[in-house]
Amino acid sequence: MFYVYILYSAESDIYYKGYTTNIERRLEEHNSEKSNFTASKGVWILVYSKEFETKKEALIEEKRLKKLNRKSIERLLEKS
């Protein structure tokens, strides 16, 4: 399975969107500063995830999420 996810850092007050095949491992990588963008931005928490059967579907959804502005992301999170 493939997953699209949104992480949030309260310390930096930012969201990060991505895709993976293992959410737990990926969250640990973000929190142990193994990802360039998320390093040194505080503790990350998983606030949203969605499962897909194919990589293609997940990448299409990730691309859509990355185009959303903050207000749209927060609206999405309120619905989920």
Image (cartoon, helix red, strand yellow):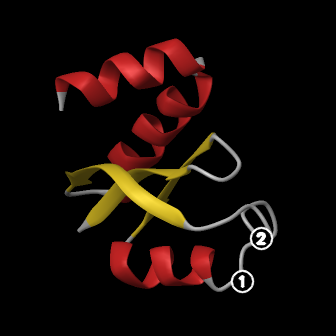
Give residue 53's position: percent from left, percent from top.
20, 57
Q: How far apart are marks 2 and 1 (CA)?
A: 7 Å
| In this picture, residue 33 sits left or right of residue 78 | right
- The residue located at (40%, 52%) in the rendering is 5
Count of numbered circles on the image: 2
Mark 1 surroundings: few (<14), some (14-19) or many (≥20) residues within 10 A:
few
Give residue 40's position: percent from left, percent from top.
80, 69
Circle 1 sits in a helix, a strand or a loop, which is it? loop
Circle 2 sits in a helix, a strand or a loop, which is it? loop
For mark 1, what is the residue?
A: 34
Looking at the picture, does residue 21 appear above or below residue 17? Answer: below
- Identify residue type, mark 1: Lys
39 or 19, nearer to the observer: 39
Q: In which quarter of the image is the N terminus?
A: bottom left
For mark 2, what is the residue?
A: 39
- The residue located at (46%, 14%) in the rendering is 72
Q: Which of marks 2 and 1 is nearer the N terminus?
A: 1
Looking at the picture, does residue 36 appear above or below residue 65? Answer: below
Q: Is label 2 or label 1 in front? A: 2
Give residue 2's position: percent from left, percent from top.
31, 63
Looking at the picture, does residue 79 appear above or below residue 13? Answer: above
Give residue 44's position: percent from left, percent from top.
53, 63
| In this picture, residue 3 sits left or right of residue 19 | left
- Identify residue type, mark 2: Ala
Whether label 2 touches label 1, CB < 8 Å: yes
Mark 2 surroundings: few (<14), some (14-19) or many (≥20) residues within 10 A:
some
- The residue located at (48%, 76%) in the rendering is 26
Q: Is residue 22 visible?
A: no
